[in-house]
Amino acid sequence: MSPPSLSTVLQRLETARGVKSVLVILDHLCIAWSGGSRKIPVVVFYAEAIVTKEDVVRSVGELYNLAFKIVRTESRLVRGILSSHGFHEVHPNSNDFNLMWTGSHLKPYLLRSLLEFQKVNHFPRSYELTRKDRLYKNIQRMQQAHGFKNFQFVPQTFVLPAEYQEFCNAFSKDKGPWIIKPVASSRGRGIYLVSSLSQIPLDESILVSRYISNPLLIDDFKFDVRLYVLVTSYDPLVIYLYEEGLARFATVKYNRATKNIKNQFMHLTNYSVNKKSSDYVSCDDPEVEDYGNKWSMSAMLRYLKQEGKDITLLMGQIEDLVVKAVLSAELQIAAACKMFVPHRSNCFELYGFDVLIDSNLKPWLLEVNLSPSLACDAPLDLKIKASLISDMFSLVGIACQDPLPRQSRSDRVSLDPSLKHQTHKMQVWASASHFSTQDIRRPEDSSQAVGCHSGSHCRGGTSISGPILQRPLTLTMALSPCGQVKVLRRTREEHQRRGGFIRIFPTLDSWDLYSGYLEFKTTMNSMLANKLFHGSKVQARMAFSSYLHRVQMRLLAESSTNSGSTWPEKDKDQMELVMRFLKRAAGDQQAPPSDQLALQDRRRVLSRQLGEFIHCYNKTEQMVENLERVVGDDRCINPGVFQEFIQQASESELEEVLTFYTNKNKSASVFLGSKSRDCNADHANVHHGKMVAYQVRKRTHNQMVAGSNPEQSGVPTHCSSGACHGCTSHQG
Ligand code: ADP
């Protein structure tokens, strides 16, 4: 849920002056409450604050003495947003920070010393995704393990000189052009196209990739898309995609003729390359998103939609490649976290995904950036990136915890006198809550940490000794119930503070599609999915059971009327459907009623068979027990309302509910049980149980979801939502 805009906050402040109301406003609008009894305050960020610099927004950070440090990078935007929320900057060597923003990976000893409330913006070993050579190797491994066509979204690539011979073989079949890149570089540096073997350098480590020579063009120009992907955890894996991104255009019209292959302004879409061109057009108006060489992603999608392109399909494929790319590095990164990161909430990471769309509307992943540029050269950059970073900080949840050890607090920074008497109350929150020093030092799931026998090795402030690090990973240990609850709560709270981020994994359907690819074998992923989606699945199945019951009752009623049917063909079709359904769902346990029987008798037999099936269905699913577990699950529709609805709903109303579930999940598998996907299976075979889809008419049932957001209704926000979000301009 997006926080209200800053202007709304200030309007409310205006109408309700006074210290008490300032406190109320701070409480309600600048702070979100988290934790078991919702006692831990976390900061809510506002993008506009970077411009308006309002005292009320700044006072949150000041009251709690919140601090950040920036290391090995220069990010004016991050600094500006944090400062405008009252955070102060500490020296790069200081340990007294809430947030560390760094341009590169952290050394293991620094990671191990993190306290529970501290956050850093990188996971260890993220280079498995962000180094071009590692990314390709990881995806190649997934291609080999799970089928080439399921991971065919990166151009074929060779690492030279090691794979020179293989490259020569590929070159003999396809003379290119090919594109040469340094293994670990960025901003288009060192990149050029080649069309002959003699142009390949043999003395350097380079990548050579198949050049996508049929890019989708807009007004004859090549472009690529920068998407922002936020991972808040690798075990369990939780991935968000930002609703807005950027489309970056080349400055010279695209022409495939070989004579042009040296023209970087035609073939490379990097801003850092094209800004040097005299043809580069920038736009000074942040409200104009489709002018010049940089557009918003949503403007680009709107344009494609107008051109008749299927942008829902496109965004679905983009989400697919994002999830699969992250999955390809999941094992290494999750294992590194287990070794080096003391608390599950310490790390988060914002990746910049560069995607090229070809003329067939197929997206190709070109690379994943470790620290996507947050430079704001144009007003559109500031509009998008300030919202992105504010939403990201709100989502990850920076706890209002004074980072200074208690003994060194005596000479705390003094506050604005007008706010001083709020301090006491705010400090009461702070101390009543939440983070006694002991709390933050308690390992959350010590009993299961890898290589951890006593639990004491795995927490902040204690170093992990050498021999323990050398032990092989044991990945099957169970997480303590307390740890599970924390993870579940954190995931739900993040989602409530998601702003413009869309969770793309896990969702009800992305879990079905991709969980089979997960490689880091702990119970965390399945625990999270079970807990997040359990309620909505139970409700879907209850609706299905009630629907079958209505059909059964109708058959029974019709079997006792002697009147001939007004629509004999329609009746026949419906009975056919029921028989086909029973054959698929109940197997060969029930023989279909004989054709020789009279219509009424066939109806009666079918009604009885359906009744038996429903009985077994309800029993095997332990519907009653499941229903009890639904209560208190905030992923689903209010259980009382739901019960009342399905008791009173007509057959056709229930059909609509089932259609709604089927459409939203792009699958009817939930009704007859879903299995994790067989990774080698063709996509088309994944969604079993499709017979429900043809039984129900193509209508949606908004009544059931009115007033509940997609997650509350248990409905996943998969690709269609990504595309739809992408189509609406993000309100900064
Ligand atoms: P860098 O990290 O230096 O930006 P990229 O891999 O993103 O390197 O490549 C830079 C640009 O080159 C891309 O933005 C894109 O325009 C172009 N490019 C890279 N790889 C390909 C490819 N395989 N096919 C077509 N164009 C490509």
Image (cartoon, grey):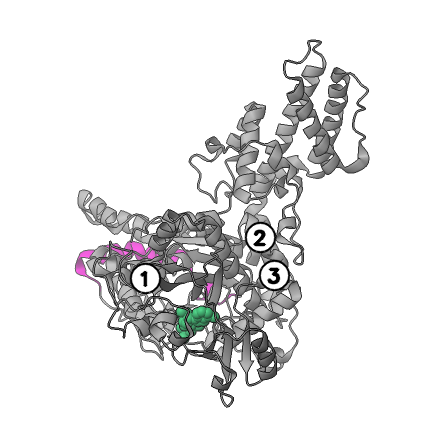
Q: Which amino acid type is shown beneath numbered disc 2?
A: Trp
Q: Up-down: is 682 above or below 366?
A: above
Can you tell which mark lies on residue 358? none
Q: Which residue is mark 3?
A: 149
Query: Is 514 situated left or right of 281 in this image?
Result: right
* Magenta residues (range): 415-442
Mark toward the viewer: 2 or 3 = 3
Mark 2 or mark 3: name the one nearer the start of the chain.
3
Q: Residue 14: image x %, image y %?
A: 18, 46
Tags 2 and 1 in contact by the CB under 8 Å rule? no
Can you tell which mark lies on residue 511? 2
Q: Up-down: is 626 above or below 178?
A: above
Q: Is mark 1 within 8 Å of ligand 1?
A: no
Quarter location, residue 612: top right
Q: Which amino acid type is shown beneath numbered disc 3?
A: Lys
Q: Which residue is mark 1?
A: 385
Residue shown at 79%/23% (left/top)?
A: 595
